[in-house]
Amino acid sequence: MSKQLAIDNSQVRTFQKCQKEYLFRHVWDLTPGLEPWLLTGSAWGAAMDVVWKSEEGPSETIAAAIAAFEEVIASRIDELSDEGSEDWRIVNRHHYHEALAEYLSQYQDLIRETFDPAKTECEIPFEVPLPLPGTDETFFLTGRMDKIVWNIAEESWWVVEHKTTGMWLGDAYMRQWSNSGQVRTYGFVGRKRWGSEFGGILVDCTSVAKKGKIAMQMLPITLPPLAGGEWEKDMREIALAIAARRAGQARYVKSSDACERFGRICCYFEPCGIDYDPRQDPASWGFRVEHWDPRDI
Ligand code: SF4
């Protein structure tokens, strides 16, 4: 087994969903074409970096935030399929500009009064070594936090996670974050890194619906003090299962329950159905070979 096994939240999610998909995506590094929702999500993240670090007035901040949003779109829009670039999220991206203006009017004062912009840092990679159970080896729990911010009144660090969606921000949508693997990972890392100076995780959700309807909610999540516990045990067990498969000691099992979700067919459905290894000719299957590591900035 590799002493350098590094797993992030996306790997854990994929492995729990379907091990065969894990093989395609995270071992063979076969990456499907860029989706419009991913592009608008990363453009929104770039705009948030401007907003949360800004010490300027609202008009300068909104202009800089829209410029950052558009810069990301321009840099990657050619990677979208024709259908993808016609997607409403891209064609109607003025809805996102309007959402940014709404975001500023709703949150800019709150952000400034609560957090110190001089201490705000964006896109923070992390790496926590953990023992692999039953071995003398180590794996690394890795990831990247959208932002870390300093709460002035509480004198504590918070992790900010931005989410964009086209869904309504109802109870079901908001509730899913409270106990999500991502939030628990941030909680674990935050408590290891800052100890009693760790405040919690702020999940910052923005919904931009098809007709431009905008909704926003911030969900602050605080967690009990670090005590190891079930979650850490689960992470170690998953790392052990991944390490065994990467070392060829077990096979990647298909999970046909996961082939269709939310009306979308798994992007590996065709090669998976005929047990074909698409690494020979990835482009003809619409894949790029790309390894994403949250620690690479
Ligand atoms: S098609 Fe189904 S079984 Fe195959 S990788 Fe995708 S989710 Fe897994």
Image (cartoon, grey):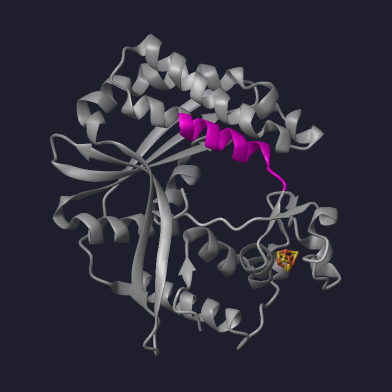
Residue 148 lies in the magenta-colored region: no
The image quarter in which residue 57 lies: top left
- Residue occupying the point 53% across, 18% down: 97
Residue 265's place in the image compared with 73, above or below, is below
Q: Nearer the viewer, residue 122 or 37?
A: 122
Residue 75 is left or right of residue 219, and the answer is: right
Q: Nearer the viewer, residue 97 or 67?
A: 67
Q: Where does ligand 1 appear, by image quarter?
A: bottom right
Measured from the top left, where is residue 98 in percent x and y? 52, 16
Q: Nearer the viewer, residue 51 or 154?
A: 51
Tell me if I can see residue 7 in this picture.
Answer: yes
Measured from the top left, where is residue 15 in percent x and y? 58, 68
Measured from the top left, where is residue 163 in percent x and y? 48, 39
Residue 101 is left or right of residue 277, and the answer is: left
- Residue occupying the point 50% across, 44% down: 173
- Residue occupying the point 42% across, 61% down: 142
The image quarter in which residue 186 lies: bottom left
The image quarter in which residue 81 lies: top right
Q: Main secondary structure of the magenta part?
A: helix
- Residue occupying the point 48% across, 27% down: 215
Residue 45 lies in the magenta-colored region: yes
Residue 160 is left or right of residue 173, and the answer is: left
Residue 202's place in the image compared with 75, above or below, is below
Tell me if I can see residue 99 in this picture.
Answer: no
Residue 34's place in the image compared with 250, above or below, is above
Measured from the top left, where is residue 268 in percent x and y? 76, 60
How many marks on residues?
0
Residue extent of the magenta highlight = 33-46
Residue 289's place in the image compared with 277, above or below, is above
